[in-house]
Each structure stands twice: as structure tokens, then as C-alpha cells.
Amino acid sequence: MVLAIIFLVVALLSAVSLIRQFKIKNYLAIVFSALATLCFGYFSVMEIICRLTDAGICP
């Protein structure tokens, strides 16, 4: 559960970076920030959902 919370913080920080890179118009950084936000965000949200509920998507 601690790892999921740490990844959620990383996802939030990369979302802030994504917004900042849109203002600067740094396209390579936009791509990397978007990928980091999606990957870390998806993993952390799914991990939290699987820990708190008995969803059918969890192994």
C-alpha cells in the first residue's frame, strides 16, 4: 500500500510537470511527462482499488 501511495505522489508530480511543459512548449518533455503520469497513475489507482475492494479485475 505504501508503494501505491508513493507512485500516486509521483503521478501527481509528473502531472504538474506536464502542465508546466505545456506552458514552455517543450514537446519531448510533454511526451515523457504524459507517459509517466499515465503509467504511475494507472498503477497506483489500480493498486489502491485492489487493496481496498474485492474487485473482479484483481488477481
Image (cartoon, helix red, strand yellow):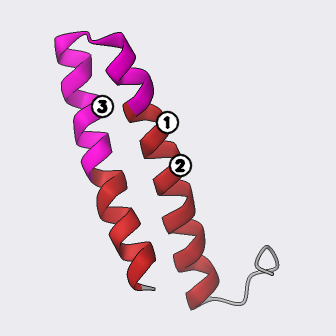
Q: CA distance from mark 2 to mark 1?
A: 6 Å
Q: Left or right: where does residue 24 sit relative to residue 18?
A: left
Determine whether 43 is above or below 57 in the image: above
Report how many numbered discs are placed on residues in the image: 3
Q: Secondary structure at mark 1?
A: helix
Residue 31: x and y, percent? Answer: 44, 23
User: For the residue carrying disc 1, how many other residues have a C-alpha within 10 Å: few (<14), some (14-19), or many (20+)?
Assistant: some
For the C terminus, the quadrant is bottom right
Horizontal side of 36 relative to 47 (left or right) equals left
Q: Which residue is mark 2?
A: 39
Amino acid bearing label 3? Leu
Among the 4 quarters of the image, the one containing residue 46: bottom right
Name the residue beneath numbered marker 3. Answer: 18
Q: Are marks 1 and 3 in contact (CB under 8 Å)?
A: no
Q: What span is colored magenta in the figure?
A: 13-32
Are the residues tagged 2 and 1 within 8 Å (C-beta)? Answer: yes
Q: Mark 3 packing: few (<14 Cα in 10 Å), some, or many (20+)?
A: many
User: What element does badge 2 sit on?
Assistant: helix
Magenta region includes residue 17:
yes
Residue 44 position within the rendered picture, expressed as x and y whole percent measured from the top left: 49, 66
Q: What secondary structure is the stretch in magenta mostly built from?
A: helix
Q: Which residue is mark 1?
A: 35
Tell me the SS state at disc 3: helix
Relative vertical location of residue 12 with respect to residue 46 in this rendering, above or below: above
